[in-house]
């Protein structure tokens, strides 16, 4: 009898922890389709401004766009996907409607931010090759401790990275003192897309080889504006 009661209490505690984890996420107030439409429309407006701007004004627009996309990705696009289930062959483009693999999560969310990229082709690449296609700003670590990784990230400005691992990929977001790993994986309490501390038990801490590709850099923003 006591064993049964303890088992039930354990289940309730696990359920409570899972609910608390989910509730910690700031849910977007807009539908996913509206978020994408808004970004697309804003891209058109930014592109017109950029085309008509002086060289000095163009630099200011690039900074403005970088801040806008960083906010949209981290505050609206990624949170829309939290809780979406993982599958090795998952290719859904709609959050919580089907499954999403790790590579497809990266390319699908970038495409949602109106980056003109080959979503399927990049998703099927080795993560380092995908990163090299996205950015020339690449930093590699081999068998580094998480203390070294955290120290390096903490020394950088706020930024968003695609990270390639031994057998996985996702995003690392550095925002102030908060550094998070955003990815789709079956090996977490949500069993899918999650944002978690970089040094929790996850593929980032367990990988021997790590490649960080800094995105939303000037060249990437200019291509977003002009293509």
Image (cartoon, helix red, strand yellow):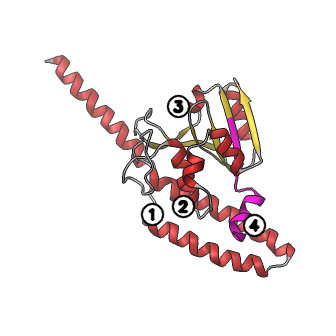
- Residue underneath mark 1: 32
- Relative to the observer, which residue lies in front, 63 or 210? 210
| Magenta region, residue range | 211-227
- Label 2 sits on a secondary structure element that is helix
- Label 4 sits on a secondary structure element that is helix
Question: In the orientation shown, which residue stands out farthest toward the left?
Answer: 1
Q: What is the C-alpha distance between the residues marked 1 and 2?
A: 9 Å
Q: Is residue 22 visible?
A: yes
Q: Are marks 1 and 3 in contact (CB under 8 Å)?
A: no
Mark number displayed over residue 112: 2
Question: In the orientation shown, which residue stands out farthest toward the bottom?
Answer: 52
Q: Are marks 1 and 4 in contact (CB under 8 Å)?
A: no
Q: In the figure, is residue 187 to the left or right of 146?
A: left
Q: What is the C-alpha distance between the residues marked 1 and 4?
A: 25 Å
- Image spot of residue 216 (x, y percent): 70, 56
Q: Which of marks 4 and 2 is in front?
A: 2
Residue 57 falls in image quadrant? bottom right
Q: Residues within 10 Å of mark 4 (few under 14, many from 20)?
A: many
Q: Residues within 10 Å of mark 1 (few under 14, many from 20)?
A: some
Q: Are marks 1 and 2 in contact (CB under 8 Å)?
A: yes
Q: What is the C-alpha distance between the residues marked 1 and 3?
A: 27 Å
The magenta stretch spans residue 215:
yes
Residue 179 falls in image quadrant? top right
Q: In the figure, is residue 59 to the left or right of 81?
A: right
- Residue underneath mark 4: 62
- Residue underneath mark 3: 202
In the rendered image, the quadrant that contains the N terminus is top left
């Amino acid at each position: 009898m006591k064993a049964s009661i303890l088992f039930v209490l354990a289940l309730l505690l696990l359920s409570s922890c899972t609910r608390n984890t989910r509730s910690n996420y700031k849910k977007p107030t807009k539908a996913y389709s509206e978020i994408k439409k808004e970004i697309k429309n804003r891209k058109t407006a930014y592109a017109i401004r950029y085309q008509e701007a002086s060289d000095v004004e163009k630099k200011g627009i690039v900074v403005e766009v970088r801040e806008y996309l960083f906010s949209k990705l981290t505050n609206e696009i990624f949170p829309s996907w939290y809780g979406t289930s993982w599958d090795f062959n998952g290719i859904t483009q709609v959050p919580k409607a089907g499954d999403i693999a790790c590579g497809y999560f990266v390319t699908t969310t970038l495409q949602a931010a109106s980056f003109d990229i080959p979503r399927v082709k990049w998703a099927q690449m080795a993560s380092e090759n995908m990163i090299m296609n996205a950015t020339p700003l690449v930093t590699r670590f081999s068998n580094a401790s998480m203390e070294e990784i955290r120290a390096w990230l903490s020394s950088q400005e706020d930024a968003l990275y695609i990270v390639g691992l031994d057998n996985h990929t996702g995003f690392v977001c550095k925002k102030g003192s908060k550094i998070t790993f955003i990815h789709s994986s079956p090996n977490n309490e949500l069993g899918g897309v999650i944002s978690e501390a970089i040094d929790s038990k996850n593929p980032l801490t367990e990988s021997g080889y790590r490649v960080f590709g800094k995105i939303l850099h000037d060249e990437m923003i200019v291509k977003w504006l002009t293509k």
